[in-house]
């Protein structure tokens, strides 16, 4: 999954560009800069999210298929159901990160550069905290009991949570790129497609986590 940092107006790019179009034999009818809620970058992000939604859906469907194939004991082979305390704290942190990101987008729509930078920075810190807790606290605890190679349950547990963690990492990288451009003054009330796309992607990551939480953590404890 590649988030291209720029491209010609004729190419589908998830980020804005300030580079001029290449010289051709005749002037292109396309605009030099794409902006607004229906830009090519916006549609590119929508298609990316649709693709990622199908991938997560396939993984979660595989989890439930395995669950009902193995009988009433779940998790299998004597593995204890996941604890809920840490995942619920992580959920609160991740979902809280959407709030400053949302207000950052609202701020730049009004041309407020300072609040844009502040909101993006706060969202980044909260997202990084979630990922650090997953890697530094949750995984060491679960790896002490089972690994990805223990059984099919272990494989799906780490695949689903790890796949989401990768999306959080990509979102953090996207956030850094957006913040760098924000500090350079690349966005204003008319030009902020990159901010819109990042906000949409980050909200997607947060929503997907609710399905991961329900499937991996809440369902086995029901």
Image (cartoon, rainbow, N blue to C red):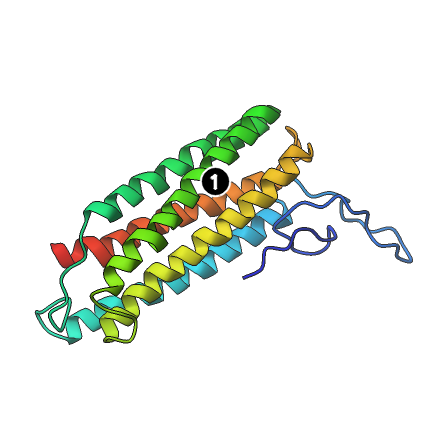
- What is the x, y in percent for residue 43? 57, 51
Mark 1 sits on what residue?
124
Please tell me which residue is depicted at 17% across the width and 56% down the height of the picture.
219
**Label 1 packing within 10 angstroms: few (<14), some (14-19), many (20+):** many
Residue projecting furthest to the right? 25
With respect to residue 187, does 2 lie above or below?
below
Residue 62 in view in this figure: no
- 116, 32: nearer the viewer: 116
Q: Secondary structure at mark 1?
A: helix
Question: 183 or 105, which is in the foreground?
Answer: 183
**Residue at position x 59%, y 55% in the image:** 3
View extreme (left): residue: 72
Tell me residue 120's x, y (percent).
Answer: 52, 35
Left or right, 162 with reference to 177: left
**Residue found 88% across the figure and 57% down from its top:** 24
Q: Quadrant of residue 152?
A: bottom left
For image coordinates 69% across by 43% down, the residue present is 34
Q: Quadrant of the C terminus?
A: bottom left
**Picture coordinates of residue 130 (x, y %)?**
37, 46
């Amino acid at each position: 999954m590649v988030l291209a940092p720029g491209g010609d107006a004729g190419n589908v790019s998830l980020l804005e560009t300030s580079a001029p179009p290449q010289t051709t034999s005749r002037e292109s009818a396309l605009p030099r800069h794409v902006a607004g809620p229906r830009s090519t970058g916006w549609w590119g992000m929508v298609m990316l999210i649709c693709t990622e939604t199908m991938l997560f859906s396939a993984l979660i469907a595989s989890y439930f298929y395995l669950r009902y194939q193995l009988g009433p004991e779940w998790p299998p082979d004597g593995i204890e159901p996941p604890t809920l305390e840490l995942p619920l704290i992580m959920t609160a942190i991740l979902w809280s990160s959407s709030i400053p990101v949302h207000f950052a987008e609202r701020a730049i729509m009004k041309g407020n550069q300072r609040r844009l930078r502040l909101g993006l920075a706060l969202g980044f810190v909260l997202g990084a905290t979630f990922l650090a807790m997953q890697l530094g606290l949750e995984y060491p605890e679960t790896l002490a009991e089972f690994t990805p190679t223990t059984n099919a349950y272990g494989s799906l547990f780490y695949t689903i949570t790890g796949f989401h963690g990768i999306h959080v990492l990509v979102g953090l990288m996207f956030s850094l790129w957006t913040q760098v451009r924000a500090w350079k003054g690349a966005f204003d009330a008319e030009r902020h497609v990159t901010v819109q796309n990042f906000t949409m992607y980050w909200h997607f990551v947060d929503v997907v986590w609710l399905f991961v939480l329900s499937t991996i953590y809440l369902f086995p404890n029901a």
